[in-house]
Image (cartoon, rainbow, N blue to C red):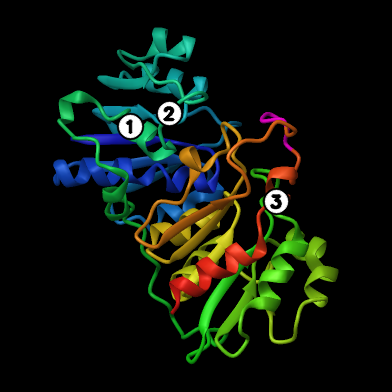
């Protein structure tokens, strides 16, 4: 059986979809599972042990799936162009949500799945797209940690940045607009409160993040290591695999850390659809915190990077969770 899973959006979304491959592989060990993804998420897919092959989707180039002879395609993230390509390739089993009009034309198995107002976690929503013919029982959230299959590549040499005597903690402040961000002043208070003799703290992000954060990083206590823009995504994944924990908003690195079993502390607003019930990290050492249970002043649809909900997260609560983890 040859199965194509299609999800061509962002890093965190892809990580939270990997358990679909894991759940199928656990039930059908002989299944050959492929992934259709965006080029920038390829380093994640290369580190998933469940996958037999990876296809890269370029929206500028017509997608031809016919040469691969897939038996199934599961449209985890709907894209009309991909649905058309699967139909043209005459893939026998084409599974998609019934909430996309083009799936009514192009898919022959429809799942009644709406994400926006759902109370389910994103991973649970993804798993619900597995066809009933596979007889896969949807796992509890507590069981999902074993289904990511995300492993680091073998390191050619030891990372000299990693402390051998301290707890290595990565703080990833920015989200590139994908999530609400906690004020930098709050994170600065967290860093100042953590014992520098116990923790080696890193500040992570992209090269652009590094430029934006430059003056803030310079204001931090000595001994903080700025790694913004120092690694490719693949190297960043492997770096996360070598540290002890990570603190971030609802971002890809947070979900990478939780998928690898690291301490992962997510910082969330209580707003739908961004709330932790939908997007919290899932893993054996995953945690989250919100400032309030409700918020009437912030727009749930606005894309601003910070809001009153995030401002109300207390730095002492963050420090307490971190210290309790590493007693």
Tell me if label 2 and label 3 are in contact, CB under 8 Å: no
236 or 197, which is in the foreground? 197
Label 1, label 3: how far apart the Cα atoms are:
54 Å
Q: Are marks 1 and 2 in contact (CB under 8 Å)?
A: yes
Q: Quadrant of residue 210?
A: bottom right
**Up-down relation of residue 295 to residue 193 (above or below):** above
Tell me if residue 117 comes above or below residue 286 in the rendering. Answer: above
| Residue under the image location 46 percent in, 30 percent down | 77
Please give the residue where the numbered disc 3 appears in the rendered image: 312
Q: For label 1, count other residues whose C-alpha is less than 10 Å away and answer few (under 14), some (14-19) or many (20+).
A: few
Q: What stretch of residues is rendered in magenta?
A: 299-303
- Judge the density around disc 2: few (<14), some (14-19), many (≥20) Cα neighbours within 10 Å: few
Percent x, y of residue 225: 67, 80
Question: Who is closer to the viewer here, 316 or 65?
Answer: 316
How many numbered marks does the figure carry? 3
In the image, residue 264 above or below residue 106: below
Which of labels 1 and 3 is toward the front?
A: 3
Q: Residues within 10 Å of mark 3 (few under 14, many from 20)?
A: some
Q: CA distance from mark 2 to mark 3?
A: 50 Å
The numbered mark, 2 or 3, whose residue comes first in the sequence reads 2
Residue at 49 percent of width and 64 percent of height: 237
Per the image, label 3 sits on a secondary structure element best described as: loop
Task: Look at the image and tell me whether residue 232 can be seen.
Answer: no
State the SS at label 1: helix
Residue 78 shown in magenta: no
Percent of width and height locating residue 176: 69, 49
Q: Position of residue 128 (x, y in %)?
A: 31, 29
Q: Quadrant of residue 211?
A: bottom right
Marker disc for residue 64: 2
């Amino acid at each position: 059986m040859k199965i194509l899973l299609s999800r061509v959006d962002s890093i965190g979304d892809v990580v939270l979809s990997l358990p679909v491959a894991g759940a199928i592989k656990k039930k059908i060990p002989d299944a050959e599972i492929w992934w259709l993804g965006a080029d920038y998420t390829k380093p994640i897919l290369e580190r998933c042990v469940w996958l037999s092959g990876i296809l890269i989707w370029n929206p500028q180039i017509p997608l031809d799936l016919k040469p691969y002879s897939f038996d199934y395609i599961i449209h985890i993230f709907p894209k009309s162009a991909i649905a058309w390509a699967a139909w043209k390739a005459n893939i026998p089993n084409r599974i998609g949500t019934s909430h996309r009009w083009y799936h009514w034309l192009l898919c022959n198995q429809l799942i009644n799945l709406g994400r926006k107002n759902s109370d389910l976690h994103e991973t649970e929503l993804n798993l619900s797209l597995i066809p009933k013919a596979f007889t896969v029982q949807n796992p509890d959230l507590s069981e999902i940690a074993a289904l990511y299959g995300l492993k680091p590549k073998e390191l050619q040499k030891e990372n000299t940045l990693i402390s051998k005597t301290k707890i290595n903690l990565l703080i990833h402040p920015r989200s590139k607009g994908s999530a609400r961000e906690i004020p930098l002043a709050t994170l600065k208070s967290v860093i100042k409160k953590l014992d520098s003799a116990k923790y080696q703290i890193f500040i992570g992000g992209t090269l652009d993040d590094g430029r934006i954060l430059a003056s803030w990083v310079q204001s931090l206590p000595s001994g903080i290591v700025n790694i913004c823009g120092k690694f490719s995504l693949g190297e960043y994944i492997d770096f996360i695999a070598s540290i002890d924990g990570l603190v971030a908003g609802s971002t890809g690195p947070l979900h990478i850390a939780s998928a690898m079993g690291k301490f992962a502390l997510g910082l969330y607003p209580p707003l739908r659809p961004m709330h932790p019930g939908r997007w919290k990290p899932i893993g054996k050492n995953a945690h989250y915190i919100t400032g309030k249970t409700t918020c009437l002043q912030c727009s749930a649809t606005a894309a601003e990077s910070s809001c009153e909900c995030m401002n109300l997260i207390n730095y002492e609560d963050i420090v307490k969770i971190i210290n309790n983890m590493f007693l």
